[in-house]
Image (tube, coloured by chain):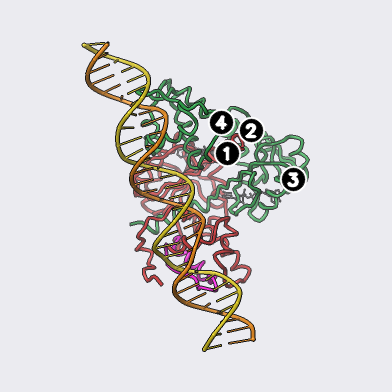
Chain colours: A red, B green, C orange, D yellow
Amino acid sequence: MNEFTSLTHLVKRIADSTVRRLSAYLRFLEDFENRGLSTISSEELAKRGGTTSAQVRKDLSFFGSFGKRGLGYSVPELAGRLREILGLGREWRVFIVGAGKIGAALAQYRGFRQRGFTILAAYDNSSDKIGKKLDGVAVRDIEHLERDIQREKPDIVVLTVPGDQAQKVVDRVVKAGVRAILSFAPTQLHAPADVAVKTVNMAMELEGLSFALTNRD
Amino acid sequence: MNEFTSLTHLVKRIADSTVRRLSAYLRFLEDFENRGLSTISSEELAKRGGTTSAQVRKDLSFFGSFGKRGLGYSVPELAGRLREILGLGREWRVFIVGAGKIGAALAQYRGFRQRGFTILAAYDNSSDKIGKKLDGVAVRDIEHLERDIQREKPDIVVLTVPGDQAQKVVDRVVKAGVRAILSFAPTQLHAPADVAVKTVNMAMELEGLSFALTNRD
DNA sequence: TAAGGCTTGTGAATTCATTCACAAGTTAAG
DNA sequence: CTTAACTTGTGAATGAATTCACAAGCCTTA
Ligand SMILES: NC(=O)c1ccc[n+]([C@@H]2O[C@H](COP(=O)([O-])OP(=O)(O)OC[C@H]3O[C@@H](n4cnc5c(N)ncnc54)[C@H](O)[C@@H]3O)[C@@H](O)[C@H]2O)c1
Ligand SMILES: NC(=O)c1ccc[n+]([C@@H]2O[C@H](COP(=O)([O-])OP(=O)(O)OC[C@H]3O[C@@H](n4cnc5c(N)ncnc54)[C@H](O)[C@@H]3O)[C@@H](O)[C@H]2O)c1
């Protein structure tokens, strides 16, 4: 019923945990779409996502009301709304910096392209890597990073350089105008508040398991 | 002051976010250790971790009181305590299931070994991969997974198989007695409550950036 | 020994996130 | 048309995490 559905009018700051769940809901909806199902209830969505139906409804309610009482949500409509909310209606342009093992795995990963993330190029400082290709993605000289950012305007930089190089690269790409970074280096990164930085820290995840195994019952 | 410092007597459930921060603090402390510094205040720790000194002290207070008023924390002592809390005083035995691109990158990653995570073996179902080595880690036939789990008792299984295979493998390793899983498949996994499951979902992180870029100001 | 400067540890207050619970709306059946 | 069975959307209640704020303790200097 709320008419202020426009995404540019977000009143409350949306929690990170909410965004992650929206992302998960979209995945389930795509699964339903593929199987030709036309509606889904918050309860079913919750069961798959390991959460509660109230949580699902609350998450969606921040953005509008997309369901029909007594019936549930239209699968294609809700999927479309979530894509819109998450900004997946468009292509996102990505640079990878660091053409090592993880960088190579990411460059070759099809899951990203499928969701609209196009990897334009990878960068490295090693002459062993520069000029090579990673499954169709060219590895360019890191020297040209700023020039290429200005020319090709990537939306996101994925950082896969060694930890002690990571902050340096962040400073460079931020200066060059990049406003979103996904880092795999196991270091804390600092950037201005208007730059979105996410870090995937696998060692931290393993340590979380170590903690859980150590401190059970 | 609190004498119930024993880690087996944890009264409150410790939040995941707390454990992640402890992990980060340990990293900073190791940095300080290497530079030969002997004490650190909660304020300095907070600055590096992008949090507040009250948060640091509260996090630590769940486990005891390790600091000296007026002075701060002894770097080596606090590092030792954190290792103990996180269960890093020992070797953790790890199997990797799925010897593809990500599995290979992880098998070759030195950061894990450094922190006490020893990769015993990798498993795959493809005859192209079985019998090969990934930087010293043997790739074995998935057929022998249960047998080897019983024999070698890995503490943790790292899951790097395609998404549609992930739940199947979880069920197998859980049945065989594994109680901790780190998955890289972009799917929601279900396991009994006494099994610790963490998922690193890179697509979800990228979507978080997409959301941030789409919904700024 | 006393004073001043610093920093911890922790209840209390606050802020943030999740869950409850129910009015209101929808559909289907008779 | 009426009733029964469902399901949404959302304030209010609860629960969890973070921040505040300060007494208590340690160190240095004189
Ligand atoms: N491999 C893994 O499984 C894994 C797991 C967790 C975290 N990580 C982290 O990911 C990052 C990369 O790891 P990796 O295993 O791919 O390492 P790697 O050594 O294979 O790759 C790093 C690449 O970065 C390049 N590089 C170094 N300095 C650079 C600079 N200043 N500018 C541009 N390129 C530069 C190197 O030439 C190399 O090709 C590290 O921070 C690591 O800690 C890796
Ligand atoms: N490559 C990446 O950068 C990346 C990024 C994000 C997520 N992921 C996820 O990580 C997982 C692996 O990705 P990848 O790129 O390494 O794929 P990949 O195809 O290179 O590797 C998957 C491996 O698993 C093996 N496998 C398949 N079914 C198996 C089974 N039932 N038992 C044992 N082994 C089996 C395959 O033979 C293959 O070697 C996928 O779930 C993917 O979505 C990968």
- Residue named by callout 3: B142
Q: CA distance from mark 4 to mark 3?
A: 37 Å
Q: CA distance from mark 1 to mark 2?
A: 10 Å
- Residue named by callout 4: B7
- Label 3's element? helix
Q: Amino acid at mark 3?
A: Ile
Residue B90, x across and y down, in percent: 61, 28
Above or below: residue A131 compared with residue A80: above
Q: Quadrant of the N terminus of chain B?
A: top left
Residue C27, x across and y down, in percent: 56, 79
Q: Chain letter of disc 4?
A: B
Looking at mark 4, is its residue's CB closer than 8 Å to ligand 1?
Answer: no
B209, A25: nearer the viewer: A25
Part of the protein shown in magenta: A62-86
- Residue named by callout 1: A206
Residue A4, x across and y down, in percent: 36, 68
Which tag, 2 or 3, sits closer to the chain's start?
Answer: 2
Q: Chain letter of disc 2?
A: B
Q: CA distance from mark 4 to mark 2?
A: 18 Å
Q: Residues within 10 Å of mark 4 (few under 14, many from 20)?
A: some
Q: CA distance from mark 3 to mark 1?
A: 23 Å
